[in-house]
Image (cartoon, rainbow, N blue to C red):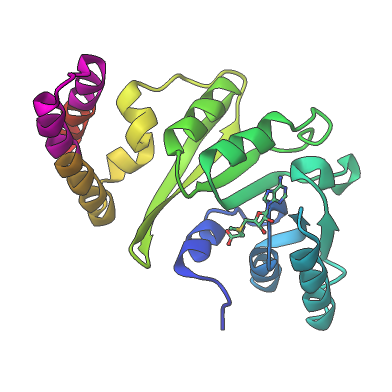
Amino acid sequence: MTLLSNRLQAVCQMVDENTRVADIGSDHAYLPVELIEQKTAQYALAGEVAVGPMSRSKEDVEKFGLSDQIDVRLGDGLAVIQKSDKIDTVVIAGMGGILITDILMRATDEQLSHVKTLILQPNIGEPLVRHWLVDNNFQIVDEDIIEEDHHVYEIIKATKVDKATPLVQAQYLMGPILMFKKSPTFVAKWEHKLNGYQKAVINMKQAKKIDQEKIDLMNQYIKYIEEIL
Ligand code: SAM
C-alpha cells in the first residue's frame, strides 16, 4: 500500500526509471521510500532542513531496511548533494514557487553537475518556476495537474538543454504542456480563474481610483484564458 497522496503519486510518476534522485524538502521521506520500493530509482537522497522530520525519516528508512539505497541528510536546499552521489534527478515538491526558485538559485555547479532532470511541484507561483527553468536552460518536457482536497496542484518536469526555447506569456502562466493536454482539471481551474478575473475587472472599473495598469493586466489574462479554453 502506498503512503503517497494523489499529489505525491503524480510527482512520483514523473520520475524516470533507474535514476538517482534527491528529494529536497522531503519531510517524511515518503517519496524516496516509494521510489526505491517501486524500483523506479536506484538510489534516493532525502534532504530536509528541519531536524524533527529528518530524524523521523532516518528512523523510518532504517526500520524499513532501506538504508542501503536511501540517505537522509539534514541541510538547506541542494547543499545535501555531494558530487559523488551522482544525483541526476532533483525533486522539490510542496513549497511555494518563490522558495523553490530560491533553493535552485542557490545551487552550485558542483551540486548540479550530474543533474539532468528537475521535477518541481509548486503549491503556488507556477509562472515564476517556469521562468526560472527557461532562463536556466531547462526545457519543460512534461506537466501534470491534479486536484486534491479542493486544491489544484501542478507538477512540472524539465530537462537540461544547451539553450531552452523561450515560452510565450500564456505558456508561462498556464503551462505549455498543460495547455496542450487540456485535461478536465486544467479546464476547471482556468474557468474558475476566468470568472474571478472578470469579476475583478468589473469591480476595479467601479472603484473610486481606477488602476488602469491592473485592469489591462487582468484583461490580458482573460484574453489568454479565453483563447486557450
Ligand atoms: N516534499 C514533501 C511533500 O511534497 O509532501 C514535503 C513538503 S513540506 C510542505 C515542505 C518541507 O520542506 C518541510 O519539511 C520543510 O522543512 C522543508 N524545507 C523548507 N525549506 C527547505 C530548504 N531550504 N531546504 C530543505 N528543506 C526545506
For the record, the magenta segment spans: 197-220
Image spot of residue 72 (x, y percent):
82, 62
Out of 10 and 224, give the one closest to the viewer: 224
Image spot of residue 173 (x, y percent):
35, 32
For ligand 1, the image quadrant comes to bottom right
Is 110 situated above or below 184? above
Left or right of 24, for residue 131: left
Left or right of 6, for residue 190: left
Q: Main secondary structure of the magenta part?
A: helix
As for residue 208 lying within the magenta part, the answer is: yes
> Where is the C terminus found, in terms of image quarters?
top left
Is 92 situated above or below 28? above
> Where is the N terminus found, in terms of image quarters?
bottom right
Image spot of residue 177 (x, y percent):
37, 39
Q: Residue furthest front?
A: 208
Is 196 situated above or below 59? above
Left or right of 146, for residue 134: right
Out of 9 and 93, give the one closest to the viewer: 93
Residue at x-position 56% and y-position 60%: 12
Q: Residue furthest top?
A: 213
In the rendered image, which quarter is residue 112 located in?
top right
As for residue 38 lying within the magenta part, the answer is: no
Residue at x-position 13% and y-position 38%: 199
Image spot of residue 122 (x, y percent):
50, 46
In the rendered image, which quarter is residue 60 located in?
bottom right
Residue at x-position 14% and y-position 26%: 207
Residue at x-position 22% and y-position 18%: 211
